[in-house]
Image (cartoon, rainbow, N blue to C red):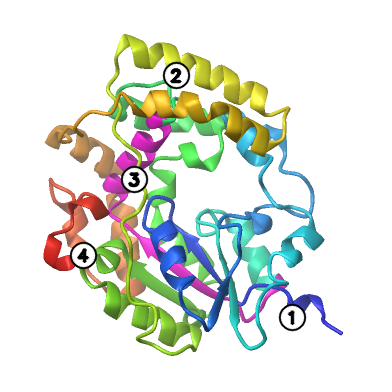
């Protein structure tokens, strides 16, 4: 007779959002020794066994998105019922690293849990986050720097974590707190650039960490990067419809809203344009409050992250050189 322990995940990809978690999840799912939950982001440990409170879902689209959280215990356990005997079970919810209550719940629920955390240049990560929300018509602020500066007021107003452009990139603080509930031996820290530059070696590191055969999962596909959408009158009109629809979508099943909204999202993405270069002064302004956290991350890990202090970032998966594909 199986117990909860036999049905819970043995590892999680815990973050960060827009740092390659989707690509890593897909790569690990090809390994026959691993079983990844069919729902990529169940978000179960973001809850305490009750529906996500509306007080923390007040940004555009938040309440609709919260409907997809798998907060019921049995529904969550059922995600892993298809795991073949002997496989290592896992799931990917990129907000676990940021959410301290989720860290504590994971450690209490699965004391032996192995956590994979991917960190990315926090300014590049924030930019990708903003582009994602703009592409779907949810981010009303057309200026990236202004959107970042709105974070504090949005957090106070109860906007969900995906709007925390700087907060999601404070990896030093997040790891410091994670290390208080789990031993470091149960945490594998990866850099986004390692997934991009050395995918085979990085996947072998993950395989070793999870106790499965290396050299089996060896390809990291480019992430499904959202397009940069120009701020035109057409876009603004469509985006207003998208935000209104997302608000109404909070009251219908998620699968219904996804089906209904597909043409609208396609219309929004049809306005894609070349991504502009981030002005150096904008990068410096977004980065400045994060510098102490980068120093903390270096202190915790003994690694240098000095490349994050530069005036240019590294872009995303689609900017990799052909030889690195």
Q: Earlier in the sequence, mark 4 or mark 2?
A: 2
Dot 1: element: helix
User: Is 259 situated above or below 321?
Assistant: above
Q: Could you tell me if the residues under marks 4 and 2 are in contact, i.e. CB atoms within 8 Å?
A: no
Residue of label 3: 225
Nearer the camera: disc 1 or disc 4: 4
Instruction: Give the Cα separation between the discs numbered 1 and 4.
Output: 37 Å
Q: Earlier in the sequence, mark 3 or mark 2?
A: 3
The answer to if 276 sits in the magenta stretch is: no
In this view of the protein, which residue sits in the foreground, 258 or 76?
258
Instruction: Give the Cα separation between the discs numbered 1 and 2.
Output: 45 Å
**The label number, if any, that marks residue 239 in the structure image:** 2
Q: Residue at x 72, y 35 (%)?
A: 253
Q: How many marks?
A: 4
Nearer the camera: disc 3 or disc 1: 3
Q: Position of residue 2 (x, y in %)?
A: 82, 82
Region rendered in magenta: 109-135
Q: Position of residue 282 (x, y in %)?
A: 20, 33
Q: Quadrant of the N terminus?
A: bottom right
Instruction: Give the Cα separation between the discs numbered 3 and 4.
Output: 16 Å
Residue of label 4: 325
Residue of label 1: 6
């Amino acid at each position: 007779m199986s117990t909860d322990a036999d049905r819970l995940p043995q590892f999680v990809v815990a973050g960060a959002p827009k740092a390659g978690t989707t690509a890593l999840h897909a790569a690990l799912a090809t390994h026959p020794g691993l079983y990844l939950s069919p729902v990529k982001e169940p978000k179960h440990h973001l809850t305490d066994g009750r529906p996500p409170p509306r007080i923390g879902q007040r940004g555009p689209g938040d309440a609709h998105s919260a409907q997809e959280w798998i907060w019921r215990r049995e529904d969550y356990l059922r995600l892993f019922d298809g795991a073949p005997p002997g496989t290592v079970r896992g799931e990917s919810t990129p907000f676990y690293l940021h959410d301290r209550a989720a860290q504590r719940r994971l450690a209490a629920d699965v004391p032996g849990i192995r956590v994979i955390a991917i960190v990315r240049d926090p300014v590049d990560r924030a930019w990708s986050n903003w582009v994602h929300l703009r592409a779907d018509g949810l981010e009303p602020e057309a200026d990236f720097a202004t959107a970042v500066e709105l974070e504090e007021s949005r957090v106070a107003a109860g906007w969900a974590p995906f709007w925390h452009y700087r907060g999601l990139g404070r990896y030093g603080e997040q790891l410091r707190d994670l290390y208080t509930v789990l031993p470091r031996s149960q945490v594998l820290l990866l850099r986004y650039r390692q997934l991009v530059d050395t995918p085979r070696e990085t996947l072998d590191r993950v395989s070793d960490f999870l106790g499965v055969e290396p050299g089996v999962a060896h390809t990291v596909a480019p992430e499904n990067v959202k397009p940069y959408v120009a701020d035109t009158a057409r876009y603004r009109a469509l985006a207003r419809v998208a935000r209104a629809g997302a608000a109404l979508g909070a009251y219908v099943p998620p699968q219904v809203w996804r089906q209904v909204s597909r043409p609208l999202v396609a219309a929004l993405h049809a306005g894609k344009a070349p991504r502009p270069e981030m002005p150096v002064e904008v990068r410096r302004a977004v980065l400045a409050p994060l510098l102490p956290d980068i120093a903390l991350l270096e202190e915790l890990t003994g690694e240098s992250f000095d490349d994050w202090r530069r005036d240019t970032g590294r872009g995303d998966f689609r900017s990799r050189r052909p030889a690195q594909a």
